[in-house]
Amino acid sequence: MQLIKRLAGCVRDAKKYAIWTLIFIVGEAIIETFLPFITADLINKISKENMDTGEVVKVGILLAVMALLSLACGGIAGFTSARASSSFSRNIRHDLFDKIQTYSFTNIDKFSSSSLVTRMTTDVSNVQMAFMMLIRIAVRSPLMLIFSLIMSFRMGGWLAMAFVIVVPVLVIGLLLIAKYAMPAFRAVFHKYDHLNESIEENVRGSRVVKSFSREEYEKKKFGEKAEDIRADFTKAERIVALNTPLMQFCMYFNMIFVLIVGSMLAIKFRGTTIDVGHISAILTYGVQVLMSLMSLSMIYVMLTMSIESAKRVCEVLFEESALKNPESPVMTVRDGSIVYEDVNFKYSAAAQKNALSGINLTIPSGATVGIIGGTGSGKSSLVQLIPRLYDVSEGSVKVGGVDVRDYDMDVLRSEVAMVLQKNLLFSGTIKENLRWGNENASDEELIEACRLAQADDFVRSFPDGYDTKIEQGGTNVSGGQKQRLCIARALLKKPKILILDDSTSAVDTKTDALIRQGFASYIPQTTKIIIAQRIASVQEADLIVVMENGQIHACGNHEELMQTSTIYREVYEQQTNGGVKA
């Protein structure tokens, strides 16, 4: 019921089209039920009386008008149901997208990006189709079934008892078919996630795939997953295909029974109990009954499939973000000071090991802090706690003297700018990308930020300059150019805290130094945290933090660490004297 209630909340503006669909479907069903009745009466009159041509024409016109009305009702219902279902699916996708925007990284990690894409595309399409069938076929088929059975017994008496034999056989057969087909359909949805994951991974890593000449391997991997889905669908479709022979068996049995028994009765009683018109009508009603049952069976199959999709959609809609605003959030960040107090952190409650352990660190506002450490030492984990991309497992992180969990998240994040090693540029012009940092920035401010980030020269080298189109993912600019544009975007934000997570790894040491000089002049009051692999990038920092195995190994300036930290000294010597110059 929760699932139905939640999806019903997505109907909204589709409701009026759904209601109109129901009205026209009822009209179509009533008209179609009366057509065989009028036709049978006409046949009986023709066979028993010398009807004049005018009477035949009148009845013919009536039948033509009713047929046109039925066609019009069906056509309008088709239009309104399509409008209702497309509006319904649009609302679901809108709600899904809005919900995902509230997710923390923990929530996204739970579902995976490929699964979320599948739920917003394939699963929503299945729910859309089910909704259209519910407001159209699922209303029409039961009405046609009931009306046709009533008219059959009214016109044919006990001859309509043929349905007592045929209907249970068809119902039981269709239920068995659906029962054995459903497991295969259910399995497909989870496999779609893995297929989309393979596509996403391949597209993102296309350069790596080509550089290692692994195209054939990727084709084989994708082919195996696609074949797995095909096999499940084939199995399910083979079972569902039994609907047709079962339907034909029941239809032909009904026709043979009605024709043989009806003909015998018509001959024996000379049309006093049943005649040719009645037999014709019962045959037509028989087809209507069986086709209605067939439609209901297909609805059952589709709805069963769609229930799985609906569950997957509602899982996203029901999921609550792991991060929430407090009831009375702090709406102002005083300054860029940062304090870690006894911080322990792991990415999930089920994780065996902490990503960070026993972190105690104080960073004054406006300070420049360098963080170095090997891969997996916890550098990125440490800074992701500042804008509250994740919450600490134990302890607290304070910004401006206030626990980050007490801030309004939008307020906190508006004062923290992060530039990642693999930062993202969006489709659009360079200007549009830069204005993500400040949507109201003037052209002069854009140019100044790019000049400080050492991006102005290469931007001006493009034929369209700052109006140059960036392709999806920024594939038409180099790694170093992308990083500098992302740094300029962060500078436009003029944050109280700027975090550079190995974001100058793709630029040379001279450019790196010029960028850091730009920080000192442009945002002197901003706290700057620089994660780097090169000692040269952090050597002049006020404080350098050395991370190892999720813990702070040492803190101090360059001279102090050269004396007290073996890790720092070894890295420095390797980079300056060991032939791996920065």
Image (tube, helix red, strand yellow):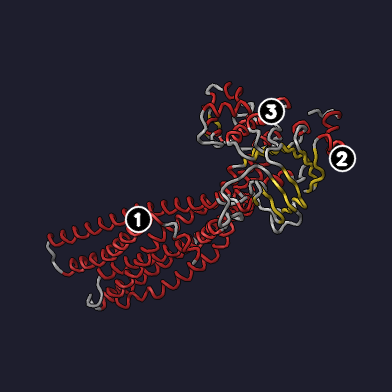
Identified by mark 1, the residue type is Tyr
Snapshot quadrant of residue 206: top right
User: Is residue 16 shown above or below 334?
Assistant: below
Q: Say which of marks 1 and 3 sits in front.
A: 3
- Label disc, if present, on residue 564 of the rendered structure: 2
Q: Residues within 10 Å of mark 2 (few under 14, many from 20)?
A: few
* SS assignment at label 3: helix
Residue 527 screen position, x and y as percent: 67, 38
Q: Is residue 459 above or below residue 128?
A: above
Q: Disc 2 or disc 1, which is closer to the eye?
A: 2
Question: Residue 241: in sight, yes or no?
Answer: yes
Residue type marked 3: Gln
Residue visible at 55% across and 37% down?
436
The residue to which callout 3 is attached is: 517
Q: Please tell me which residue is depicted at 33% across the width and 71% down the height of the picture.
A: 149
Indicate which disc, 3 or 2, sits on the residue closer to the N terminus.
Answer: 3
